[in-house]
Each structure stands twice: as C-alpha cells, then as structure tokens.
Image (cartoon, rainbow, N blue to C red):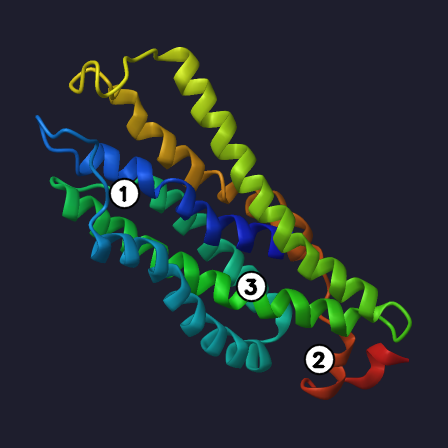
C-alpha cells in the first residue's frame, strides 16, 4: 500500500494539469482554452520529484537512527496531510494558487521520498531467503496499480461532474463552457491520495520493528532467537 499510494500521489498530477490550465489560465475572448505556461507546468509536475529526492536522503538516514517503524509512521502522516493540503490549495491569483499547490506538492514528495525506500527495506528485512524476491517484486508491482488507480479515479470524478453539470463546447460558448464546479475536480483527485495512506495507518502502527534492524542497529539480538 505504501508503493500504491506513492505512485498515485506522484503521477495523478499529470492527469489534472490540463484542467488547471483551463481553469486558471483561460483568457476571456481567447480562441482556445488556456493552458499552463511551460514554466508553471514544469514546476507543478516536477516539484514533487524534487521533494522525493530530498525525502529519500533525509528519511533514509533517519530510518537508520530512529528505526523503520517510527519513520514509516512519520512519512505516512506527512503524506496524508500534504495530499489533503494539495487539494485545498488557495490563492487570489492563478500564480498564487499554483505556488501554494507547488509548496504542498514538494512536502508531499518529501514524505513519499521516505515512504518509497522504507517500504522496500521493511519488506526485505521481514522476508526470508525463499520469499524475499517475490515479496520485493510484489511491492514494486504496486506502483503500476497506483498509476492505474489514478487514471480510474480521474475518469470517474470527471464523468460524474460532466454528467451533473452539462456545459456547451468552448467554441459554442466560451464563457459558459466551464462550470464553476470544475474547480473541485482536480482537488478531489489530489485529495483522494490521502485515502489509501490513511487506511493503512492503524496496521503500520501495529507493525513491530524489523528483527534485522533491532539486531544490527539497536543491538538487541534476542528478537532473532
């Protein structure tokens, strides 16, 4: 579920960038709907990856100091909060809203950066020699399911709003072609990333520290007996 959530949160942003440009950068009277400027699009899509790099370095070091279980919980809380905050991005202007979104997306990526390596590390430390390869493969396979889930959620939410709020095509009536409620679509898609993370919180907190970490780092070999 860690990799599933990581993949969903990282890649769902690419599904809403066109809508962001349509909502925030459409100029009245323009012949075509607005799109995100190249620099804004690059920032919105890439800022989480920058946070991921920083998060991997920081939480990887912290996981060796504090233990996998404690840091795993910290990254989960950070991911839930920043997923919700990304959907609540605000601003009095288009650039202000995008700046707020980028800020929260960076810290979301920071949490993902910790969750990503810890998920694989914990699985490898729990598994035995015979099943380790299969379990690690299963962990990484969940990334594909997370990306697929992002597409499904985007389709369902978009279809629901399209059915509920009928609007004319842009070339027919530019002013009426965008329902005010469309601003909720991208917010719901981004905030949905908090759901799988939140659902696993209880089980993560109940999960014991890995025996290999306890034996090798905490110097307590009794758990291996």
Q: Relative to 133, does residue 225 appear above or below in the rendering?
A: below
Disc 1 or 3, which lies upstream in sequence? 1
Of the 4 image quadrants, the one containing the C terminus is bottom right
Q: Is residue 219 visible?
A: no
Distance of label 1 from label 3 (alpha carbons): 23 Å
Q: Which residue is mark 1?
A: 89
Q: Contact, CB < 8 Å: mark 3 with mark 2?
A: no
Q: Secondary structure at mark 3?
A: helix
What is the count of numbered marks? Answer: 3
199 relative to 164 in the view: left or right: right
Q: Secondary structure at mark 2?
A: helix
66 relative to 120 in the view: left or right: left
Q: Secondary structure at mark 1?
A: loop
Q: Give the quarter of the image for residue 58.
A: bottom left
Distance of label 2 from label 1 (alpha carbons): 39 Å
Q: Which residue is mark 3?
A: 115
Q: Position of residue 28 (x, y in %)?
A: 9, 27
Give the residue displayed 63% in from the left and 51% down from the top: 144
Q: Which mark is residue 213?
A: 2
Q: Nearer the viewer, residue 224 or 169?
A: 169
Q: Nearer the viewer, residue 142 or 60?
A: 142
């Amino acid at each position: 579920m860690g990799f599933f959530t990581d993949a969903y949160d990282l890649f769902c942003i690419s599904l809403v960038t066109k809508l962001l440009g349509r909502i925030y950068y459409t100029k009245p009277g323009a012949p075509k709907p607005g799109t995100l400027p190249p620099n804004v699009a690059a920032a919105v899509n890439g800022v989480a990856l920058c946070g991921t790099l920083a998060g991997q370095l920081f939480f990887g070091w912290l996981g060796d100091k504090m233990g996998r279980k404690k840091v795993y919980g910290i990254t989960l809380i950070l991911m839930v909060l920043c997923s919700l905050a990304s959907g609540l991005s605000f601003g009095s202007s288009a650039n202000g809203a995008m700046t707020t979104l980028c800020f929260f997306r960076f810290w979301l990526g920071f949490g993902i950066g910790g969750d990503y390596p810890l998920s694989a590390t914990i699985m490898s430390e729990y598994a035995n020699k015979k099943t380790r390869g299969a379990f690690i493969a299963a962990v990484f396979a969940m990334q594909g399911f997370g990306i697929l889930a992002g597409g499904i959620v985007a389709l369902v939410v978009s279809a629901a709003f399209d059915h509920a709020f009928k609007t004319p095509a842009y070339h027919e009536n530019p002013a009426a072609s965008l329902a005010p409620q469309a601003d909720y679509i991208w917010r719901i898609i981004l905030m949905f990333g908090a759901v799988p993370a939140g659902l696993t919180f209880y089980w993560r907190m109940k999960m014991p520290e890995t025996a290999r970490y306890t034996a090798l780092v905490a110097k307590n070999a009794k758990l291996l007996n």
